[in-house]
Amino acid sequence: MGVATDIMQTFAAREIRSHFRESEGWECRQEPSPVPGSMAFILSREVRGRKEVIPLAVCYEETPSLFPLEYLTSTINVKKLTGKYLLVPKGTDVTALPGDIRVLFMDSFGFIDERLVWLTKKKNAKQYPQPEAPVTSGSATPASEPHTA
């Protein structure tokens, strides 16, 4: 027996866990989404006796819809939310989003020429370069010479 989840859902869950770690007390609970293909999560943790609750929606559209996030926010029975988050692929147009929504960009998916592509493939990885670390110059020993300690 296998699990019937899309690979995109697996990568989205992995991205969420990288931002909201269990070791920091975050609990991640998936909720039903009103939009097919979209995902919705409620993240929560307790810090010093205070409960933090965050609704998070995952959207794979180039111009994201806020409907899944608004729907999820309306179903939560909490007086004050810690924040609202939207997880989207790199290259998504987020200029029209309200200022109270925090946007997290995926490392595994992005838009290239208006197409959603998997960025972990080598042919697509060059499209979003990472900042390079400065090169330090030092005396390197060739592999053929033994190191002296």
Image (cartoon, rainbow, N blue to C red):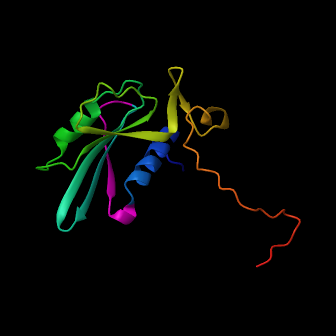
Residue 28, percent from left and from top? 34, 54
From this viewpoint, is residue 6 visible? no
The picture quadrant where one finds residue 128 is top right
46 shown above or below 39: below
Residue 45, percent from left and from top? 26, 60
Q: Residue at x 22, y 56 (%)?
A: 52
Q: Nearer the viewer, residue 133 or 9?
A: 133
74 shown above or below 35: below
Q: Nearer the viewer, residue 133 or 24?
A: 133
Q: Is residue 100 left or right of residue 4?
A: left
From this viewpoint, is residue 134 visible? yes
Find out whether residue 25 is within the magenta segment.
yes
Q: Nearer the viewer, residue 129 or 5?
A: 129
Q: Residue at x 42, y 28 (%)?
A: 92
Residue 106, percent from left and from top? 46, 40
17 shown above or below 122: below
Q: Is residue 93 left or right of residue 54?
A: right
Q: Residue at x 39, y 25 (%)?
A: 93
Q: Residue lying farthest top?
A: 113
Q: Is residue 115 left or right of residue 27?
A: right
Q: Quadrant of the C terminus?
A: bottom right
Q: Residue lying farthest right?
A: 144
Q: Which residues are magenta?
A: 22-36
